Image (spheres, rainbow, N blue to C red):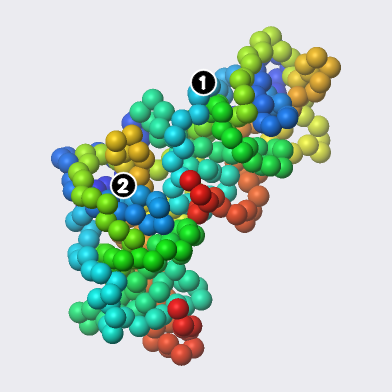
Amino acid sequence: MISGTAAPHARRAAVEQPRPVIVFEVAGRTLAIPAGDVLEIRSTDSLAGEATPFTPAEFPWVRHILEREGAPHYVVNLCALFRLARTRPTLVLFLRGGRAALLVDRIERMDAISWIFALPRAFRGEERNWYLGLALFEDRVVPMLNARGILRSEQLAQLDSQAAQPVAGAVPA
Amino acid sequence: MSGALEATEKAYVLLRLGERQFAVPAEQVEELAAAGQLEKIPHTTPQLEGVILRRKRVLAVRDVARQLTGRSLPLHRFYLVVKQQYGAVTESEAIPVTGDCELLTGVVALPRGEHEPEYAAGWIELGGEQILVLDISKLVADEPAGAPDSAGKSA
């Protein structure tokens, strides 16, 4: 996995060799994620019958819950999380080593990067969890998603608790 | 940086935000750059509009116009690149400004008044007009709590 820790002098997070990343689009915005953090890419249509609408009030960006390998997984709508214009996502990225899946509009391409810029310290909100840093693709700055920062462990615990009481905690998506 | 201005001659950069002029101590300014490609990234931090790539660095773009004048700048013509302090670390940030900036040297600033906002470092007089000297670091601290973020606004 690409480290988000920046070398203080250069404000860059170096990696030893180019690592593959998946560049994708959500509501017209381009984002990227280390390919190693993605376990599986499926179409949203393939979730039919498997995923149940699930949107706790505290997590309005969570859209569905589904069971995988005996554990609840949560489908996150990135448009809602990032407060972008609503779109019709076509793909779901299941993340490795976590229980989150991300709805995205389309995969733009695979690429490889050797380093990323640290997120400027001016950014002080939730985005510090969302991103490993900022990647540069052909003079375009693209946020690199932190797979473990979209749904953090404490949030997963809250979601699990809500999922255990679906009638009280959930509203239709 | 301390908000207090010493009563000695210093250099200031005069900047324009819409119809109003402000001044920033010159030692806090790196350069004035023509507006380049603003990259909007989803975030929740008030004031920030996105980032720009400048001299192989990624700089946060901070719109202070809304805080200082009540309205954001519709058009970024230039970025004033300033030094912002985060604890022991200094980072550069870009502030959109309306037009050219001017360097004033040998200016003695008047101290800030008791009831003026924290981001006011003092005043300078220019052609009979009093111009507010900004303490850039206090502009960050004075961010309105719960202000709407810029995530989701059109690029």
Compared to residue B122, the image places residue A122 above or below, namely below
Residue B37 at x, y = what percent? 44, 34
Nearest the viewer among B128 and B140 is B128
Which amino acid type corresponds to the residue marked 1 in the rendered image? Answer: Glu
Residue under label 2 = A4
Residue under label 1 = B31
**Residue under the image location 38 percent in, 57 percent down:** A26
Circle 2 chain: A
Nearest the viewer among A86 and A146 is A86
**Residue under the image location 35 percent in, 44 percent down:** A142
Q: In which quarter of the image is the C terminus of chain A?
A: bottom left
Residue at the extreme bottom of the image, as rendered:
A167
**Residue under the image location 57 percent in, 48 percent down:** B46
Whether residue A144 can be seen here: yes
- A77 sits to left or right of A122: left
Residue A32 at x, y = what percent? 30, 51
Nearest to viewer (mark 1 / mark 2): 1
Compared to residue A59, the image places residue B44 above or below, namely above
Crowding near the residue tagged with mark 2, few <14, some 14–19, many ≥20 C-alpha atoms within 10 Å? many
- B95 sits to left or right of A39: right
Residue A149 at x, y = what percent? 36, 59
**Residue under the image location 20 percent in, 50 percent down:** A110
Circle 1 chain: B
Residue at the extreme left of the image, as rendered:
A17
Instruction: Check residue B120 in the rendering and tell me which mark sits there, or answer none.
Output: none
Compared to residue A27, the image places residue B26 above or below, namely above
The quadrant holding residue A54 is bottom left
Q: On the same chain: label 1 and label 2? A: no
Nearest the viewer among A100 and B27 is A100
